[in-house]
Amino acid sequence: MRMTDLKAGWAIVGNDGRRFGTVESVGQNYILASKPGLRGHLYVPASHIANVEHEVLYLNLAKREADEMGWEQPPRDRDVPDTTSETDLHRHI
């Protein structure tokens, strides 16, 4: 699955099965996520997505660990999805 295949509204879950948040939008290297009870957004790096199944993104770490990652800060670079028709094998999840 490519980053551009991910959709807003999908759940984000830690590898412990606990809900982490919800996908708001998708960039090339980050998922913009919202979290219940938290103002603002989280910027979840694509490198921490372990699996995607049935409209759920599974992280490669537990919810508690993800909570401590400091993902409240936006990425330094512009993070626009790559929509070229070329195969982008290194970005597949």
Image (cartoon, grey):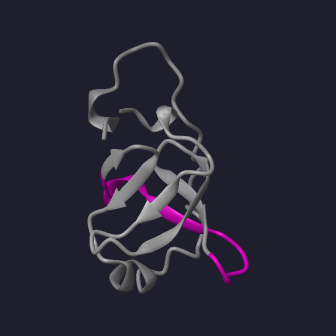
Drawn side of residue 93 relative to residue 12, left or right: left
Place residue 37 in its image quadrant: bottom right
Residue 56 image point, x, y percent = 43, 52
Drawn side of residue 66 relative to residue 10, left or right: left
Place residue 2 in its image quadrant: top left
Q: Residue at x 55, y 36 (%)?
A: 81
Residue 40 image point, x, y percent = 71, 74
Q: Tell me where the magenta segment starts and ends, as one range.
A: 36-50
Place residue 3 in its image quadrant: top left
Q: Residue at x 55, y 45 (%)?
A: 27
| Residue 71 vs residue 38, the one in the foreground | 38
Q: Residue at x 39, y 75 (%)?
A: 18
Q: Residue furthest right?
A: 39
Residue 22 image point, x, y percent = 57, 61
Q: How many marks?
A: 0
- The quarter of the rendered structure image containing the C terminus is top left
Residue 49 part of the magenta segment: yes
Q: Is residue 77 above or below residue 41?
A: above
Q: Residue at x 51, y 30 (%)?
A: 82
- The quarter of the rendered structure image containing the N terminus is top left
Q: Is residue 2 above or below residue 84?
A: below
Residue 36 image point, x, y percent = 64, 77
Drawn side of residue 75 relative to residue 88, left or right: right
Drawn side of residue 19 relative to residue 39, left or right: left
